[in-house]
Image (cartoon, rainbow, N blue to C red):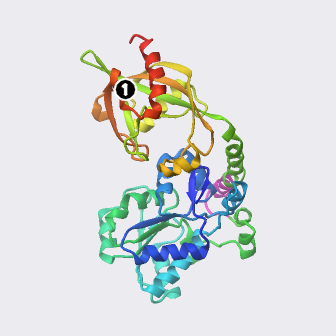
Amino acid sequence: MANILGINLSELSRLGVMKKIGEFLNGTGQHYLVTPNPEIILNARRDEELFYILNKADLAVADGFGLKLAGFLFGKKIPRLTGADLTLDLLRLAQEKNFRITVLNWRGGLSRAEEIKDVLKKEYPRLETLILDASRSQPLAPKIIDQINDFAPTVLFSTFGSPYQEKKIYHNLTKLPAVRLALGVGGTFDFITGRAKRAPKFLRAAGLEWLWRLIIPAKGHGAKIRRGKRIYRATLVFGGQLFRAKISRFFYRPNVACLLYKKNNGLIKILIVEREDEPGHWQLPQGGTDGESLAKAGAREMREELNTDKFLVKATFKNTYSYLFPPVSQQRSLSLSPNYKYDYKGQRQGLCIAEFTGRDEDIKVNFWDHRNWKWVEEHELVSRIQPARQESAKIFLTKFKSLNL
């Protein structure tokens, strides 16, 4: 398993990927596959839900020549398998093994459901298909879920594009019990219908598909500019992030710990959260400062992790505590998320203290960050959190008490 900017990627060959897919399809469980490319990985750095979903996938196949080069930079051999090639392999396999397929097609994309259906009927005459146009920005309608369940496909494709396709699959897969493998394939079916033209094989082999996208005409107002921006991010921005990750392992990540408290009948209670990736690991909410002030970063983290803005920032303290991350091997053995650990050797924490002004029902933790939350009395804080975090908690409490709130 390789890890590029925090996203786990398979090192299986094309043959190995198809063998693993065969195991999924011949089993009884449900699985989903993702095909990250450099742009998707960059987006996942800002979209924590997408980051979580990508790393929870049963198989992540690198789609993008840049990831092959990134693997070389970090001493990993990452085979490239495009979503388009993988889709063709799966369609052939489905016809051979009599697996039914469903395509959830983005209504706003280039190809319509009828077009996809007609082309698949011609190219794969024995393949049973259900092709449905749907909105990518709205929840899947009960009618669509019923149609899919009545058809009972083994394989589900989504053409919604990232991050819509990954999120739709993650949140709806259990509602579709017949599906054994689901995957998002973006505009792959546009190549199959002829609505879009793939780069010639020699350009694909050389990793120059981005050049082809610049050359071919772009349809729609501003499409050329949008395409140029995407290519810029997938090449120069992605390359810059790789370089940054390579050198920043020698530095501490600026971080803010959030001490959110409330007063209740003369008692002060402090909020702690339980990590999603490590059950029983309780801590204060925290996150990277991303160049912001401690007050701004702390407020952002509390809004993002607790989904509430019912608080008032009272004070901040710089450089209160520093610690090293455990070795990568230990992170994996503990099933810890590599969210920020790929970039730095440890964290240097500041402290943001805020008073909660809302009601408990205003707090809703994100499923990709935390599995639970609770209030603990001030004197219980140190004993109720993860032992490795108790030393920092003592320092934070000292700062808190100095305010005489």
Residue pictured at 57% horizontal, 74% vertical: 16
10 Å crowding of disc 1: few (<14), some (14-19), many (20+) = many
Residue 106 vs 127, above or below: the answer is: above
Residue pictured at 55% horizontal, 72% vertical: 17
The answer to whether 207 appears left or right of 98 in the picture is: right
Q: Secondary structure at mark 1?
A: helix
Q: Position of residue 317 (x, y in %)?
A: 53, 19
Quarter of the picture holding the N terminus: bottom right
Q: Position of residue 229 (x, y in %)?
A: 67, 52
The amino acid type of the residue labelled 1 equals Leu
Query: Magenta region's main secondary structure?
Result: helix
Q: Position of residue 68 (x, y in %)?
A: 68, 62
Can you name the residue that lies furthest to the left here?
A: 265
Quarter of the picture holding the C terminus: top left
Q: In this orientation, which residue lies closer to the viewer: 375 or 220?
A: 375
State yes or no: residue 228 in magenta.
yes
Span colored in magenta: 218-231
- Residue with the mark numbered 1: 381
Residue 21 vs 262, above or below: the answer is: below
